[in-house]
Image: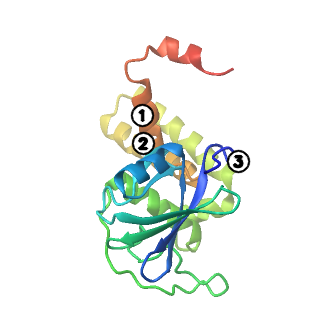
Amino acid sequence: MVDFNKNNGLVPVIVQDVDTNEVLMLAYMNEEALKKTIETGYAHYFSRSRNKLWKKGESSGHTQEVKDILVDCDSDTILLKVKQKGVACHTGRKSCFFTNLKTNEVLVDKEKEIEYNFVDKLYHTLLDRKKADPKTSYVASLYKKGENSILKKVVEEAGEFCFAVKDNNKDEMIYEAADLAFHTLIALALKNIHPEAILEELKRREGVSGIEEKKSRKK
């Protein structure tokens, strides 16, 4: 009943509180995510930034118990009616829709402080910096300057890391590697790619010969 062929195997999912009808969030499902949702009774989605399947609330505990699944007239959008445990938004707000577009006013206060692992927290911080004042945020200033400026910094930091390795200076290697990683994460966040997607790619390569892996790449 669901057409997964229109958007690279994904369909948008509108998530609604079953009791209040409040719209909580928008996510995406592939066929596997829908199957897991039906099988378990809890919402599973496909993360485009992580490039993997995930259960809502798997780290925060703020799960969504699915009460009903509806599909639209074109069979390419799903509506989930859920019993939300805790909050739906990663910011700690009940709904992901809390900012007035015209005034930029935040309409909904945080209900909870959600604990994330360091990489996840850093990634979301970098995303938030897209909306920050460039005068008060270094990352926001890079975003404002644009993609070329960010890539220039990545290349610059890569060079400084190489010099630190050549100098065999352990402290400098650590410092410059951190700078390189940080600016690489900024570039990934610019394209909305979660660093966990990189870890998933490395996991995929585990046990695979580097020579064979390179041969398998599309030219």
Nearer mark to the viewer, of 2 and 1? 2
Residue with the mark numbered 1: 164
Q: Which mark is residue 176?
A: 2
Nearer mark to the viewer, of 2 and 3? 3
**Residue 180 visible from this viewpoint:** no
Q: Quadrant of the C terminus?
A: top right
Q: Place residue 86 in its image quadrant.
A: bottom left
Q: Amino acid at mark 3?
A: Lys
Mark 1 surroundings: few (<14), some (14-19) or many (≥20) residues within 10 A? some
Is residue 202 depicted above or below 4 in this figure? above
* Closer-to-camera residue (2/10): 2
* Closer-to-camera residue (91/184): 91
Mark 2 surroundings: few (<14), some (14-19) or many (≥20) residues within 10 A? many
Residue at x 43% of width, y 37% of height: 200
Query: Where in the figure is residue 204, as x and y percent of width and height?
Result: 43, 28
Nearer mark to the viewer, of 3 and 1? 3
Residue with the mark numbered 3: 6
For marks 3 and 1, the one nearer the N-term is: 3
Residue at x 70% of width, y 47% of height: 6
- Looking at the image, do the residues carrying marks 3 and 1 touch, with CB atoms under 8 Å apart? no
Is residue 188 depicted above or below 13 in this figure? above
For marks 2 and 3, the one nearer the N-term is: 3
Q: Secondary structure at mark 1?
A: helix
- Looking at the image, do the residues carrying marks 2 and 3 touch, with CB atoms under 8 Å apart? no
